C-alpha cells in the first residue's frame, strides 16, 4: 500500500515524465517533417534477397559434363600422386611406397573391377586419402571412367 506522500511524489514524477514525453514527440514530429524517414528504405533490401535464386551449384561442371569435371578433378586432386596422365609418377609419388597406381599398367588394372576402384577412391587405400565426402558418388564414378580411358593408351 502506498502512502499519500509517495503518491504525490510519484504523481509529480509522472508529470515531469509526461512533459519530457511531449517534448520528445514534438521533436520526433519535427524530425519527421524534415524528411528524416529511415524506415521507408527498410523494405527495399528484402525484395532483391527474396528474388535472388539459390546459390549456384559449387560444381556446376559436374552436372553439365561429368567427363569434363572428372578431367578437372583428376588434374587438381589426383595428378600430384598419380601423374597428369595417370602413370603413377606425380611429384608426390617419389616419397610413397607402395607407389600410386599406374593406370596404364594393364596387368594390375585388369584385376580390378570398376566397383573395386570406386571403393578404393571412396575409402582411400594405403597412402591415398579417402575421397568420399570430398567428391560425390557420381564424381567418383566419372573419375573411374576417366581412369579407364587413360589406361587405354600405353
Ligand atoms: C597422396 C597421393 C595420392 C593421391 C592425391 C591420390 N592417390 Fe590414388 N593412390 C595412391 C596410392 C599410394 C595408391 C596405391 C595404394 C596401395 O596400393 O596401397 C593409389 C591407388 C589408387 C587406385 C587403385 C585402387 C586399387 O584398388 O588398387 C585408384 C583407382 C586411385 N588411386 C585413384 C585416385 C584418384 C581418382 C585420385 C584423385 C581423386 C587419387 N587416386 C588421388 C596415392 C594417391
Image (cartoon, grey):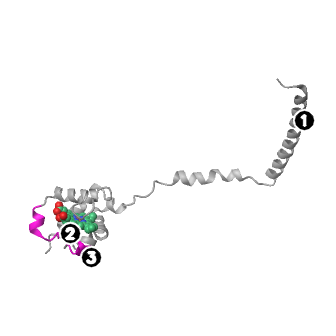
Report which residue position mark 1 lands on: 12
Q: Secondary structure at mark 3?
A: helix
Residue 23: quarter of image:
top right
Q: Is residue 50 left or right of residue 15?
A: left
Query: Looking at the image, in which quadrant does ligand 1 appear?
Result: bottom left
Q: Is residue 101 magenta?
A: yes
Disc number for residue 100: 2
Tag 1, which secondary structure?
helix
Q: Position of residue 47 (x, y in %)?
A: 58, 52
Q: Is residue 110 left or right of residue 40?
A: left
Residue drawn where x is 25% and y is 57% of the image: 122
Query: Bounds of the magenta span?
Result: 88-111
Quarter of the figure with the C terminus: bottom left
Within 10 Å of disc 1 (Cα), the crowding (few <14, some 14-19, many 20+) is few
Q: Nearer the viewer, residue 145 or 126?
A: 126
**Residue at 82% over, 23% down:** 1
How far apart are labels 3 and 2 at the CA level? 11 Å
Amino acid at each position: 500500500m502506498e502512502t499519500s506522500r509517495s503518491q504525490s511524489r510519484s504523481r509529480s514524477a509522472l508529470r515531469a515524465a509526461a512533459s519530457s514525453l511531449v517534448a520528445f514527440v514534438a521533436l520526433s514530429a519535427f524530425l519527421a517533417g524534415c524528411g528524416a524517414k529511415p524506415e521507408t528504405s527498410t523494405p527495399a533490401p528484402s525484395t532483391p534477397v527474396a528474388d535472388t535464386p539459390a546459390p549456384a551449384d559449387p560444381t556446376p561442371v559436374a552436372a553439365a559434363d561429368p567427363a569434363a569435371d572428372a578431367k578437372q578433378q583428376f588434374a587438381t586432386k589426383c595428378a600430384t600422386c598419380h601423374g597428369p596422365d595417370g602413370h603413377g609418377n606425380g611429384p608426390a609419388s617419389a616419397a610413397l611406397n607402395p607407389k600410386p597406381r599406374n593406370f596404364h599398367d594393364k596387368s594390375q588394372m585388369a584385376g580390378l573391377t570398376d566397383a573395386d576402384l570406386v571403393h578404393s577412391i571412396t575409402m582411400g587405400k594405403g597412402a591415398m586419402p579417402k575421397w568420399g565426402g570430398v567428391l560425390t558418388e557420381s564424381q567418383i564414378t566419372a573419375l573411374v571412367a576417366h581412369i579407364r580411358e587413360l589406361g587405354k593408351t600405353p
